[in-house]
Amino acid sequence: MRELSQRQFAEAQKCLKKGDILAVPTETVYGLAVSLDNHAAVKRLLDFKQRGTDGDKILTLMLPTVKDIPKYAKVSHWQMALARHHFPGELTIVLPKNDSFKHRYFDHFDSVGVRIPAHDYMLKLLQRTGPLLVTSANRRGQAPCLSATDIKNRLPDIEAVVSGNAGGNLPSTIVDWTGDAPFTVRQGGLLIVHYA
């Protein structure tokens, strides 16, 4: 396993481009990231997490800015208001998928979960790589990793890890707004008390 410093953006980009799974810190927990455009890497990440395309858990699409959301999701004025209020932040919003967004993985789903992390390294990486597919850094049924040391000890078969520690908070709050009204699917560190 390669360990990269948070200054080695070019090396991180090379890892993602060639199809490696990259363990990355966020303001919540460590994540496992792959390039959205590398379908082989997406398949490897799904296999690692023991997920298929027939379940209800969808890989999170991490984006660099709020203005990128309409490229991938159908989003109303009120949904954008929620996004602008809480992004970057500890929130994942599940929205109806944009019909024009064609992707070998997402074509199996009618929705997409988007997130913009409030983490300096991740925002800078996303600005360089574009969207990444990310899931929590853990094996199925285990707690997420919170540091690069955790990754090396518990997930030694991951190709590369970015050094550091995660925020140590709960995983992101997940709000599903694919219907008429939003509802909280998973309560994380962020409490949503007002949607509009």
Image: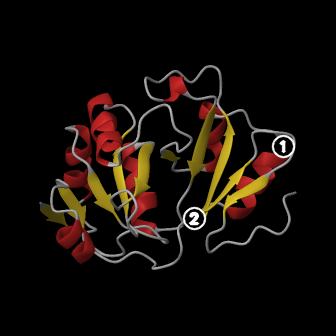
Numbered disc in front, either 2 or 1: 2
Q: Which mark is residue 13?
A: none
- Of the residues shown, which amino acid type is indicated by label 2? Ser
Q: Nearer the viewer, residue 179 or 121?
A: 179
Q: Which mark is residue 77?
A: 1
At x 24%, y 53%, the residue is: 12
Q: Quadrant of the C terminus?
A: bottom right
Of labels 2 and 1, earlier in sequence is: 1
Say if 22 sits above or below 51 in the image. Answer: below
87 horizontally vs 136: left or right: right
Q: Quadrant of the N terminus?
A: bottom left
Q: Farthest residue toward the left?
A: 1
Mark 2 lies on a secondary structure that is loop
98 horizontally vs 144: left or right: right
Percent coordinates x, y for residue 169 in the rendering: 51, 78
Say if 14 sits above or below 168 in the image. Answer: above
The image quadrant that residue 34 belongs to is top left
The image quadrant that residue 133 belongs to is top left
Give neighbour class at mark 2: few <14, some 14-19, many 20+ (Cα, 10 Å).
Answer: many
Give the CA separation, mark 2 to mark 1.
23 Å
Percent coordinates x, y for residue 50 in the rendering: 35, 45
The image quadrant that residue 157 belongs to is bottom left
Percent coordinates x, y for residue 20 in the rendering: 21, 45
Q: Which mark is residue 172?
A: 2
